[in-house]
Structure formats: C-alpha cells, structure tokens
Image (spheres, rainbow, N blue to C red):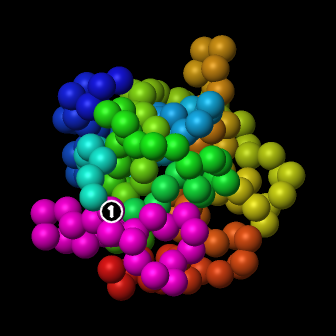
C-alpha cells in the first residue's frame, strides 16, 4: 500500500475515540521482514512517512531515536531491531505508525503498512507459551484472516526490554 493509500486507511471512522464499537476487532496490519503483524486500531493515532530520526544516547538498541512531530518530541522504535531482524535501508514504503502507549505517543518504524482488517475474537488464538521472557511476551495472539495468520502485538509491551528485564525504555519514553 502506498503512502497515500495508508493515509486514506487512517481517515476512516474507526479513529473516533468516542465510538469504541467501530474499533472493536479492527487491527492495522503492517509488514516487518517476511511477516505480517497487527495492532489494535484503537492504539493508532496516525501514519506518517519516514522522516529524520535523531539518535539519543543510552537508549535500548531498538529505540531508533526521536522525531519532532508538529512540535512534540516522540520516541521512535524500529520494529526490525525490536524483532532482532537485519536492518535495511528505508524506502518510499517505510512508514512510522504513531501509537498511543500509556498516554504517550510512540512511533513504530515498519517496512510497509498493509490495511485495516476485522479479526473477531473467535478468530484469535492465544500466543504460544514458548518463551514469555523473549519476544513472545509482546504477542497478544495470532489472528486468522482467511488462510493467513497475522501476528497480533500487544502495544503496551513493545517498549519493555524483555531481554534485560528492564522497563527503562518505557520509562524514558515518558520523559521525551
């Protein structure tokens, strides 16, 4: 989906915070590496094109830095780094999905935004209990969409550094 289409995806009624029924079972899907992921649409505030990210010292590896978004400085998390994938150059399809985590805006760099899909609760399987100390702790579940599986992420746990048991990444984003 091109950037213009991604913006059109975000202009629907599902972003109206007063009407949670329109957001129920809706997930913004995006691609990172070879996999499709989803996050509950109620957490998404906007999708923007990639822009200059200022590195900040002494942050976890997966925090790429900060951006100035209309006068507000927000931290940016690189989802490739978060999932221990190889870095790649950003291109015209790379986007920053701005989400609200614990009343703070955070940007998530993704390879490409796909679409908003309905995934009813009965189509969501629990996350595997393989390794709750690692990346699987970030999983909300596995959503079945036709013959495909979307990896559904728990936005509130993306900032927690599971490898070190350190919540410093989350605490520092509040300062930004």
Task: Please name the residue shown 51% across and 83% down the image.
Answer: 58
Residue that label 1 marks: 53
User: Which quarter of the rendered picture does the N terminus lie within?
Assistant: top left
Q: Is residue 53 above or below residue 130?
A: below
Q: State left or right for residue 143 relative to residue 106.
A: right
> In the image, residue 76 lies at what x, y percent?
40, 63
- Give the residue furthest to the top: 147
Task: Please name the residue shown 33% across and 80% down the image.
Answer: 176
> In the image, residue 119 lies at what x, y percent?
53, 30
Secondary structure under the numbered disc 1 in the rendered image: loop
Q: State left or right for residue 40 relative to residue 142.
A: left
Task: Please name the residue shown 52% across and 43% down the image.
Answer: 88
Q: Which residues are magenta?
A: 53-75
Q: State left or right for residue 104 relative to residue 70.
A: right
Res. 41 visible in picture: no
Q: Is residue 154 above or below residue 111?
A: below
């Amino acid at each position: 989906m091109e950037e213009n289409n991604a913006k059109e995806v975000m202009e629907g009624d599902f972003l109206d915070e007063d009407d949670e029924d329109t957001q129920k079972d809706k997930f913004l899907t995006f691609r990172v590496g070879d996999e499709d992921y989803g996050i509950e649409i109620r957490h998404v505030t906007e999708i923007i094109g990639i822009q200059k990210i200022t590195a900040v010292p002494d942050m976890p590896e997966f925090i790429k830095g900060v951006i100035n978004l209309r006068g507000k400085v927000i931290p940016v998390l690189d989802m490739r780094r978060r999932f221990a994938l190889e870095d790649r150059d950003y291109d015209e399809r790379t986007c920053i999905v701005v989400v609200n985590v614990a009343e703070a805006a955070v940007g998530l760099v993704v390879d490409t935004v796909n679409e908003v899909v309905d995934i009813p609760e009965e189509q969501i399987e629990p996350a595997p209990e393989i390794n709750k100390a690692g990346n699987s702790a970030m999983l909300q579940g596995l959503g079945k969409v036709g013959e495909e599986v979307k990896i559904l992420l728990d936005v509130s746990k993306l900032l927690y550094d599971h490898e070190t048991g350190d919540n410093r990444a989350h605490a520092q984003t509040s300062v930004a």
